Structure formats: structure tokens, C-alpha cells
Image: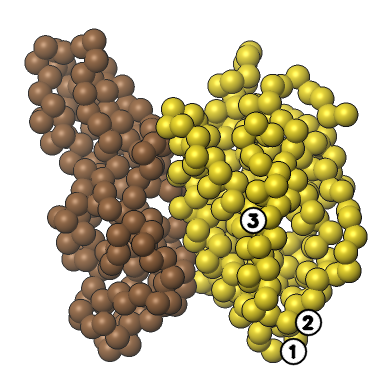
Amino acid sequence: MFANDYNDSVNLLLFLADTNLIMSQRLAEWCGKGPTLELDIALTNIALDYLGQGRLFYQQAASEISGVTSEDSLAYFRDADQYLNLQLSELPNGHWGQTVLKVYLLAEWQQIVYSRLLALSDEQFLKKAASKAIKETKYHLQWSSQWMLRLSNGTDESFSKMQQAINHIWPYVHELKQVPSYAENVLSQLQLEEQFSKNVSATLDQTKLVLPAHFVFNAKGMYGIHTEQLSYILAEMQVIQRNHPNLTW
Amino acid sequence: MVNSEEIDIKQVWQVLATVSDPEIPVLPITDLGIVKAVFLEDGILHVQITPTYSGCPAGDVILFDVQAALMAAGFENAVVENVIFPAWTTDDITPVGKQLLENYGIAPPVNRYLSNIDLEKITVPCPRCKSNNTSLVSAFGSTACKALFKCNDCLEPFDYFKCH
Ligand SMILES: [Zn+2]
């Protein structure tokens, strides 16, 4: 059973913030190593969008947590089992096609989740943040889906690499269709599941990619259960602040 | 220092017009459309600024620059706030702002807010030679708000300010 000291509202904020931050940190690994200068810059910009969105949610979470908490303490002083990010976000970048697939899947997911938050009332923070974030997500979705099609319908090699990426990533996609218990009053399980499957199929149907045989792999990053990968990311991301607390640029 | 009874909102806007986004120095923030509100509350001057992109690294710098410009003009106790709602869109760029962008060599947004974000399907005139014969190089340019295009006539690459 999942339990921490936070209420549902804070946990939902951390779920959204952590997923964005870890995606951002992962994508930043491409900085300076992109296949071309333009793609390097594109990925860096997308990573920056994730970071900005993550900060919005952390700042709000910090304001809702009693005591001395800041966006930085949430990012730098929590351990892996306190992080609520989707496991997809922590998976290694792999090759270019695998990175594109990760960005694509997260964009489809964010588009649905943020759209849902837009239905909240104007006063609610989640609506304000979503109205800001969804515009960035639309560009991520457009950019990544075009790359999905380009690689999947490209050469034999690009196709086989995309198929390889699908085989590797697909077990983690089940989590993207789950609404965590702390978000049940905001997100609809049925709607998320249906909409996500429908939207992803619309893209995959334009390719010859084959989904792996059905099996259920219950990734539970949203409840703080992670692959070993997250610890490595956090170690690198947090080491400076943990060794030199309150150090600033 | 300007006393609160003497604060002239119009003068505040004039001060704000001297501040620009460090990544687009040619464009005052008042023409970029990120100044959401200027008002007095209990004698305190409030200035609300909204970020263009949530991760825009210029965001913090702009808030700082606004505070500094206001202080230099005598508005020492101004409260400069970051607001995110309603979200900024490229529709908020003034006609003057769009002209300034084009003069600077950045093609202004060709559509209204998110009406058409498929960058491969829109026609973006070259800011230099005005030719419509241009093509997309990359959906993300030097910053998140821009895409990179090239002109097939004058052969110059140029930035395009994406609809957002
Ligand atoms: Zn030209």
C-alpha cells in the first residue's frame, strides 16, 4: 500500500513534477551529442520545457507542504523511493529512435493529462499550469510523431531500430494508462486508457511496427517503485547539493 | 523615490518599455506582450509579468531587469510578480512588436495562437527578401520559441517565431 506524509494534491503535483524533471535530466544527456546540431538543439529545448513545467509543479507543491520546503529541496533531497515519476521517464535514452519513442509517448500522455486539467476551474493551479504546459506539449508531440513516422517508414535499419525500441519500451507503457490513487478525483482512468490507446494507435497504424505480445508489466513509478536507473540519475543530479548544501551558481 | 500618491501608471508602462527579453533585445517586453498588468493596491505598485515558455531561461532575468528598471526610475517598492495564467500566446505580441521582429530578421508568427503548428505546412515569408519560397530546417531554433527556416531564394537561414 502506498503511503507518504503528503496529501493527494501534493502527491499529484510531485507525480507531474518528477516525471518532467527526470525526463528533462535524461534528455539533457544528449546535449552536445545530438545526431545533428539542429536535433541537439531541439532536444535541449524540449528538455528545457520539461524542466520549466517541472518547476511550476514543484513550486506549487512546496507551497502546499508545511514547513521549510522549496522546489530545490524537493528536487535535490528526496531519494528514489520518494520520487513518483513514471518509470518510462527514467529509462535510458538508448539510441536516437528509442529517445524519440520516449518523447513521443510522454507527449501523448501529457497531452491527455493536461487537456483533462484544463477542464478544472480557472482558480485551480492545475488548470493554470496545464494551460501553459499544453502548448509546449503540442510541439513535442508534433516533432516526435514526425520522427516516429520518418524512422519507422525509413530504411530497413531505421525500421528495425524503431521495432527494437518498441520491444524494449512497451512493457513500461502500461503505467501511462494508469491513474494513481491520489489523482482519482482529477483524472479518469477510463478516459486516460481509451484516449491514450486510441491516439497512439493512430500514429502506429501509419507504420509497420508490431507491438509485442500482450502481457502486463505493472510498473509503479507513480508509487515510488523504480528501476535501478533512477538511483543513478539522482546520484548525478543531486551530488553537488548534497555535498555542498545551498550552493548556488 | 516616487510617492505612491504620485504614481502615474502611464509612466510605469514607459519604464517597462525600456526592458527587453535578453534573447530578443530588439523587442520591448511591452510589445512582446508579457506584461499582464500594472496596478496600484494599497499604495503599492504591482507589475505582473508572464513567462513566454515555462522553461524560458530568460524568465528570471526579465523579472530582475524589470525590478531594476523600476528602481532606477524611482519606483523602489514595486512588487514584480510572475503570473502564469492566462498563459501568454504569440497573439499577445503587438503589431509594432511583429514589425520589430521582422526588421530584426526574425519572421513573426504567421497564424493565430496554435491555429496551425504543423511547421512543414505553413508558408513563412523570408524576413530579408520577403520571398514565400522558404522551407523548414528545424522545428526548434536557438530558443524554444523559435524554429529555423531557410530561404530558397536569397539562401539565407532565418529564425521563425512559432505560434504559441
Ligand atoms: Zn530570402
| Screen quadrant of the C terminus of chain A | top right
Residue at the spot 45% in from the left edge and 44% down from the top edge: A132
Which label's residue is closer to the chain start, 3 or 2?
2
Residue A162 on image: x %, y %: 74, 75
Quadrant (top left/top right/bottom left/bottom right) for the N terminus of chain A: top right
Q: How far apart are the alpha carbons under marks 2 and 1? A: 6 Å
Give the letter of the chain under mark 2: A
Q: Is residue A180 visible?
A: yes
Q: Are marks 3 and 2 in contact (CB under 8 Å)?
A: no
Q: Mark 2 falls on what kind of element?
A: helix
In the rendered image of the structure, the colour used to display chain B is brown
Label 2: which residue?
Answer: A160
Do marks 2 and 1 share a chain? yes
- What's the amino acid at mark 1? Asp
Ligand 1 near label 3 (Cβ, under 8 Å)?
A: no
Whether residue B6 is situated above or below residue B31 in the rendered picture: above
